[in-house]
Amino acid sequence: MPFAPLAIFGLPEWAGRLVLVGAVVVVAGLLLWLISWAVPKWMARSGPVDGPRSRQRQTAISALATSLRYVVLVAAVVAIFFSLAGAGGAAAFSGGALVIVVVGFASQRLLVDVIAGFFILFEDQYGVGDVIRLEPSGYTGEVESLGLRTTVLAGPMGERMIIPNGVISAVRTIPGGLRRHRLELLTRDPDGVQEILHELGASTAGAGGPWRSAPRVVRRDGVDGVVRLIAIVEVDAAREEATRWLADAVADRAGDMLVAAPLLGVDPADTRTPPA
């Protein structure tokens, strides 16, 4: 017989079930839209990401929004199943249990991501606004949002990187988003090499460049006419490969002015993060 609430409209049983399914879909869609509408407002009210407490609030909001979306979707799927199977009855409940088991096996990857995301949030490994490097992928950027299933990073050029939490094996947090690299140059013409270094660094510094300021020489010494120049390069953590470009460009421009190939590495004085 048709569902009791819909019987008064004279609908047959199959039509009543379809009406209920449609109602569930509409309600679920409205709830998902409401969550998407409310999250940016919650984020704005929590203030700029400029302190630990603000970052914790934004991370909590991001995680809560993701959790609510999953709750709505799971509830909608269960409600649709019971609507099609017929409300009430042992057969409907046993069928629902079977569906849950089948879905559980089919979504093992999802469960791994969700469990990993739970521990990331529970242990406060990182949060919204942090600049991090994820291993083994090597993706580096600022955490835009953190949910139970994925971590979303914003790259320096505006790109968005969406990484499932289950594939993250290690995390490197980079305070300030900068990495200090040390460039060592052996030359018989230190003034010429230093000028080349300054020109190359200054041409790509500032807005849109990989480093906040031009590379600077912090040490200059020599023996038997060979001078060692040591320069420090502060590079955007997401664009560390630019330091290799700088070393190669100096070598190409300097040519015979260099006694040996440039040596490049993380500055030992940068104790904010472990060496790569």
Image (cartoon, rainbow, N blue to C red):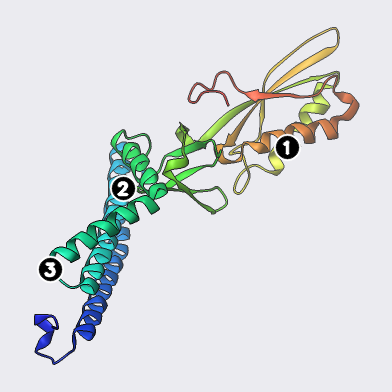
**Residue 47 at x, y = what percent?**
30, 50
Residue located beneath label 1 in the image: 245
Residue located beneath label 2 in the image: 58
**Residue 227 at x, y = what percent?**
79, 15
In this picture, residue 2 sits left or right of residue 129:
left
**Residue 163 at x, y = what percent?**
47, 47
Q: Quadrant of residue 182?
A: top right
Q: Helix or strand or loop: what does disc 1 sit on?
A: helix
Tell which circle, 2 or 3, labels the residue nearer the N-terminal end.
2
Which label sits in the foreground, 2 or 3? Answer: 3
Tell me the quarter of the image containing the N terminus.
bottom left
- Residue furthest toward the bottom? 10
Which residue type does callout 3 highlight? Answer: Gly
- The crowd level at tag 2 (other Cα within 10 Å; few <14, some 14-19, many 20+) is many
Q: Helix or strand or loop: what does disc 2 sit on?
A: helix
Q: Nearer the viewer, residue 8 or 29?
A: 8
- Residue furthest toward the right? 256
In this picture, residue 213 sits left or right of residue 90:
right
Which residue type does callout 1 highlight? Answer: Trp
**Residue 229 at x, y = what percent?**
74, 20
Residue located beneath label 3 in the image: 88
- Residue furthest toward the front? 91
Residue 272 visible to the viewer = yes
Please tell me whether residue 102 is drawn above or below residue 4 in the rendered image. Answer: above
Q: Nearer the viewer, residue 204 or 139?
A: 139
Which residue type does callout 2 highlight? Answer: Gln
Q: Quadrant of residue 80?
A: bottom left
Tell which circle, 1 or 2, labels the residue nearer the N-terminal end.
2
At 18% from the left edge and 65% from the top edge, which residue is drawn?
Answer: 91
At 74% from the left edge and 31% from the top edge, which residue is drawn?
Answer: 247
